[in-house]
Amino acid sequence: MQFFEYMLAAFWQVAILAVMVGVGYACDKFGLFTEKTAKACNDLLFYIITPAVIINSFLNVEFTKENGLSYLLFFGIIAAFHLLGILVTKPLFRGAGEHRSIYQYATMFGNMGYMGLPLAKAVAGDIGVFYCSAAVVVFNIFAFTYGIRLMDKESGKMQLKKLLINPGTIGIVIGLPLFLLNVKLPAVFATPIASLGSMNTPLAMLMFGTYLANTDLPAMFRQKENYGVALIKLVVLPLVAILALRLCGVQGPMLVTAAVCCGAPTANNTAMFAAKYGRDTGVASKVGGLVSILSIITLSACIALADTIG
């Protein structure tokens, strides 16, 4: 697949997101689904829909020794990438005041679910989706532990209760044994889980749109921190990851899928976490919007690089 095909695939994923965000924006302007209503939906998204996404990702993979080892390897790769993100972002954005945590979160956490899964399918086939599902699990582990620590104003340090009891770990505690034991749930349970999980991106994007409707959109392009986030999130971190993985012998579909996951733009849930933990949803929405736009070019380049050297 050539560079422009990668770019087109990334463009369509961003375009689909943009349409859903636009619907949310219009709904807020017409009073059909406002920012106040969106914030009231946060707990639904966090405590019901997010665990369903994680559980469903496990249910869609059949466990064998070979793919189990591959899954663990990719799991470790993405975990190492998140640890790298923690080290890189920790000293950054000191001049951003109370918004520092938002920029750090936006720099570290990528859209591995909605952007990652379909792009992995497009560039690496079913094996790409298999690897990317491991990345989604890792993302949720870090998002609901370190991510909460960053965004929660009341949490200055990691709290054991929040580490153990949160939507991410609950989903893993339920889904991982099902995966390891090759359990196939009856349709009466599997279908509702899949349906609830499928609500994740549409609801998140509608909520995102309401936040944008209440912000100064031109400021998205004026805020210098947004470009700092984009540079590190879309260029520095993925380049380091791709080159390091290739030097370690990773190649083929695994390297290409890693490029998709590591080069993905800012996570959808940045604005959701901002709303949940009392941060500025406007700042979160603007940085997410700009990084997603720029990722059309950078993500394509990351995939092309991984495909060329792998």
Image: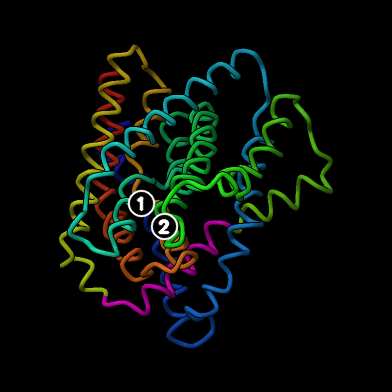
Quarter placement of the N terminus = top left
Horizontal and vertical percent position of residue 109: 38, 46
Horizontal and vertical percent position of residue 193: 72, 49
Q: Which element is circle 1 on?
A: helix
Rendered image quadrant of residue 258: top left
Q: Which residue is mark 1?
A: 105
Mark 2 or mark 1, which is nearer to you? 2
* Residue at 31% in and 61% down: 289
Asked whether, in this view, residue 250 is left or right of residue 100, the answer is right
* Residue at 15% in and 60% down: 224
Q: Is residue 62 above or below residue 202?
A: above
Predominant SS of the magenta segment: helix
| Tag 2 near tag 1, CB within 8 Å | yes
Q: Which residue is mark 2?
A: 151
Camera-side residue: 112 or 166?
A: 166
Q: What's the amino acid at mark 2? A: Met
Q: Which residues are magenta?
A: 200-216
What separation in Å lies between label 2 and label 1 (alpha carbons)? 8 Å
Q: Is 215 within the magenta?
A: yes
Q: Callout 2 environment at 10 Å: few (<14), some (14 to 19), or many (20+)?
A: many
Q: Is 244 within the magenta?
A: no
Tally the numbered discs: 2
Q: Is residue 75 above or below residue 209?
A: above
Horizontal and vertical percent position of residue 95: 17, 59
Q: Which element is circle 2 on?
A: helix
Quarter placement of the C terminus = top left
Rendered image quadrant of residue 283: bottom left
Rendered image quadrant of residue 263: top left
Camera-side residue: 194 or 2?
A: 194
Horizontal and vertical percent position of residue 107: 30, 48
